[in-house]
Image: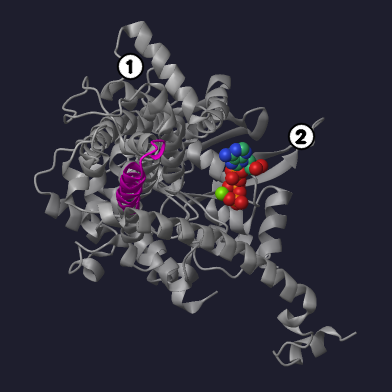
């Protein structure tokens, strides 16, 4: 056994085979296999979708309405516009509510009060509730307030409820990452707690909030279950044009097309998948750009 | 003692008042520079700006500080020293109600500001903090420009300002930072050195024209040169402000403070909780040369050992 002094003078090269023992090599291989399996599956999926979609990836996808009689000219126009309507309405409802709730919980709520602790725990639970439950909740709500289920507003309410917990949680994390010293510095100058939130904490947390919010919205964009339950229409031959307009969205449209027997529908479904993926990539890319651009190290 | 921290004020050390020199002979006086107090006339009893009477401070059920009574004098620098955990920061934070921000923190007894109960009903903590500013241990500039760091306080407090530019310059000059930053006012405050950041925080505090400035170990994150500059600065600021400083550095207390309060933590009867209490409060020269309490003497001599 080497003494401490000897250890210190030992050269820095690995003496005990380092990473070359059979066990560690085996482990490394296992890791690689797991990783390649995941990546390969994804690649195969993407490539096959893309191949299927290729004949239909043209302008018609974006300009034509879906059609029951001529699947070869069916397009996703109504679904794309519907998705935009729903997602914008969702954002308008969920973002201010979520941020406000997060600010209350993080900056004003007394964590020693039992009701605040209860909200805290249940928020985590809400984030884990299956999407379809929010669809059912909204259906019930619509029934009570006399709202037609299959309209943009109903879909947006369901999706807003779905992503609200996620927005609250990520916003809270962004607020929490702003050091307490900044708040204290502001308060010690005689700023009110509200001024401190508006002028210091919130601006510093915006990048984190934006990232979390965009990711939450992209989840909502890809969600089909609650909207299916609400009866988002599938064959729409007009542009959804308001909160009370009937609508369809890309995921529902894809779901429906994929269930049709005609091969042309399968192809256009694949094309719509590519379009949806492109949209999601765009949003996630934006989130990454915001994070890297404005990220602050304290 | 590090020579760079010696200030011009140390010069009168040799000629310190005769009354002190007798006690210097009696007690093993530590080799520290002149205390800020010794070359100034100080009344026996300070003119109170803030006064604590039988103050207990709790965090939930835990009593962190027990029975503190002391007076912070106008245009004086009062230092609070003592071992870690004895409640210096706790007391300091209670003096401008920053303790309110800690859930469960509670003050009993009376803390008055110009005779008015600071914790009385109807007192707005925001207003208290406008009059009694605070500088923290770690420099905490806002993630804004140097200019905006200074302008922030006057803006949020709705101060009537003729020219914000003038106010910013004045505050930076008062904090002895103007010459170093006058060409980069629009740059981020994060580009400054730690010492500069701390002076920026002092400037920011000055800009809202408080009456009292609380400082919690303002130099503990700084090197000796930056420390010396801040000590010089405190000396200047005393003309216009009342300063209360917590420090672990006893030479610093001896150098800058007019009066010093020594705290210690004692295990309470019954429970094993260690509760902070005030041991001795007196002129700095007295505390460091001829302390009345054994524990003060032990602490001071132990440190200088
Ligand atoms: N936010 C808090 N919540 C609960 N207890 C606290 C809190 N802050 C301080 N305390 C407790 O109060 C006591 C005094 O702490 P305080 O920070 O005032 O000591 P201090 O004299 O400033 O020490 P140091 O010199 O290390 O800064 C300690 O026992 C500490 O654990
Ligand atoms: Mg402390």
Task: Say whether marks 1 and 2 touch (CB < 8 Å).
Answer: no
Is the shortest distance between ligand 1 and the CB of mark 1 under 8 Å?
Answer: no
Mark 1, chain letter?
A
Say which of B24 and B199 sits in front.
Answer: B199
- Ligand 1 closer than 8 Å to the CB at disc 2? no
Asked whether residue B90 is drawn in magenta, I would say: no
Q: Which residue is mark 2?
A: B268
Q: In this picture, is B256 found above or below B228? A: above
Residue A30, how many percent across, how many down?
A: 69, 67
Name the residue at 39% across, 45% down.
A215
How would you rate the neighbour count of disc 1 (Cα within 10 Å): few for under 14, some for 14-19, many for 20 or more?
Answer: many
Segment colored magenta: A258-281
Tell me where residue B52 appears, x and y as whole percent.
52, 32
Residue hosting label 1: A149
Instruction: Pick whichever, B100 or A213, lies toward us.
Output: A213
Tell me the quadrant of the picture where the N terminus of chain A can be found: bottom right
User: Which circle marks residue A103 in the picture?
Assistant: none
Label 2: chain letter: B
Q: Is residue A277 magenta?
A: yes
Alpha carbon separation for disc pair 1 and 2: 66 Å
Nearest the viewer among B64 and B81 is B64
Residue drawn where x is 48% and y is 69% of the image:
B13
Residue B292, percent across and down?
67, 48
- Above or below: residue B22 compared with residue A53: below
Q: Is residue A61 left or right of residue A12?
A: left
Please tell me whether mark 1 sits on a helix, a strand or a loop: loop
Helix, strand or loop for disc 2: loop
Query: Which residue occupies 61% across, 59% down?
Result: B289
Residue B8 position in % (x across, y down): 38, 71
């Amino acid at each position: 056994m080497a003494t401490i002094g000897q250890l210190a003078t030992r050269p820095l090269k690995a003496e005990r085979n380092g990473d070359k023992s059979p066990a560690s090599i085996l482990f490394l291989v296992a890791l690689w296999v797991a990783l390649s399996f995941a990546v390969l599956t994804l690649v195969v999926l993407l490539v096959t979708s893309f191949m299927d979609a290729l004949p239909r990836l043209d302008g018609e996808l974006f300009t034509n309405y879906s059609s029951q009689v001529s699947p070869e000219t069916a397009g996703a126009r109504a679904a794309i516009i519907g998705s935009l309507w729903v997602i914008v309405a969702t954002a308008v409802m969920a973002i201010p509510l979520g941020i406000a709730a997060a600010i209350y919980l993080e900056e004003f709520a007394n964590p020693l009060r039992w009701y605040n602790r209860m909200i805290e725990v249940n928020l985590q639970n809400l984030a884990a509730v299956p999407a379809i439950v929010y669809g059912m909740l909204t259906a019930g709500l619509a029934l009570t307030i006399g709202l037609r289920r299959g309209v943009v507003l109903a879909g947006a309410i369901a999706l807003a409820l779905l992503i609200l917990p996620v927005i609250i949680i990520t916003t809270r994390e962004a607020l929490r990452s702003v050091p307490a010293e900044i708040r204290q510095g502001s308060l010690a100058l005689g700023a009110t707690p509200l001024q401190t939130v508006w002028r210091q904490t919130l601006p510093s947390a915006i990048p984190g909030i934006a990232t979390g919010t965009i990711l939450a919205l992209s989840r909502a964009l890809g969600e089909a279950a609650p909207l299916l339950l609400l009866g988002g229409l599938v064959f729409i031959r007009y542009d959804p044009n308001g909160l009370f307009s009937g609508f369809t969205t890309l995921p529902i449209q894809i779901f429906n097309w994929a269930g049709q027997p005609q091969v042309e529908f399968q192809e256009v479904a694949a094309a719509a998948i590519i379009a949806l993926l492109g949209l999601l990539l765009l949003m996630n890319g934006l989130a990454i750009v915001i994070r890297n651009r404005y990220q602050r190290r304290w | 003692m590090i020579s760079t921290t010696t200030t011009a004020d140390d010069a009168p050390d040799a000629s310190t008042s005769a009354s002190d020199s007798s006690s210097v002979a009696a007690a093993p006086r530590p080799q520290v520079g002149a205390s800020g107090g010794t070359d100034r006339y100080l009344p026996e009893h300070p003119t109170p700006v803030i006064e604590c009477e039988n103050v207990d401070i709790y965090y939930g059920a835990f009593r962190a500080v027990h029975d503190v009574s002391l007076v912070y004098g106008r245009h004086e620098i009062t230092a609070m020293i003592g071992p870690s955990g004895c409640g210096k920061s706790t007391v300091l934070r209670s003096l401008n109600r920053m303790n309110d921000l800690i859930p469960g923190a509670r003050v009993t007894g009376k803390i008055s500001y110009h005779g008015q109960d600071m914790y009385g009903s109807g007192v707005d903590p925001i207003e208290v903090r406008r009059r009694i500013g605070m500088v923290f241990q770690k420099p905490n500039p806002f993630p804004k420009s140097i200019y905006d760091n200074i302008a922030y306080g006057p803006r949020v407090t709705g101060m009537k300002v003729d020219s914000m530019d003038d106010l910013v310059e004045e505050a930076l000059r008062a904090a002895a930072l103007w010459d170093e930053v006058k060409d980069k006012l629009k740059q981020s405050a994060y580009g400054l050195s730690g010492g500069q950041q701390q002076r920026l925080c002092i400037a920011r505090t000055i800009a809202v024209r408080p009456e009292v400035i609380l400082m919690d170990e303002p130099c503990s994150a700084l090197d000796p040169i930056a420390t010396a500059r801040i000590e010089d600065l405190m000396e200047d600021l005393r003309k216009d402000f009342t300063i209360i400083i917590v420090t672990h550095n006893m030479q610093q207390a001896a150098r800058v403070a007019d009066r010093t309060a020594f705290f210690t933590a004692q295990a309470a009867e019954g429970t094993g909780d260690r509760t902070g209490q005030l041991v001795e409060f007196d002129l700095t020269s007295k505390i460091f040369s001829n302390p009345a309490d054994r524990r003060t003497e032990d602490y001071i001599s132990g440190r200088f050992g």
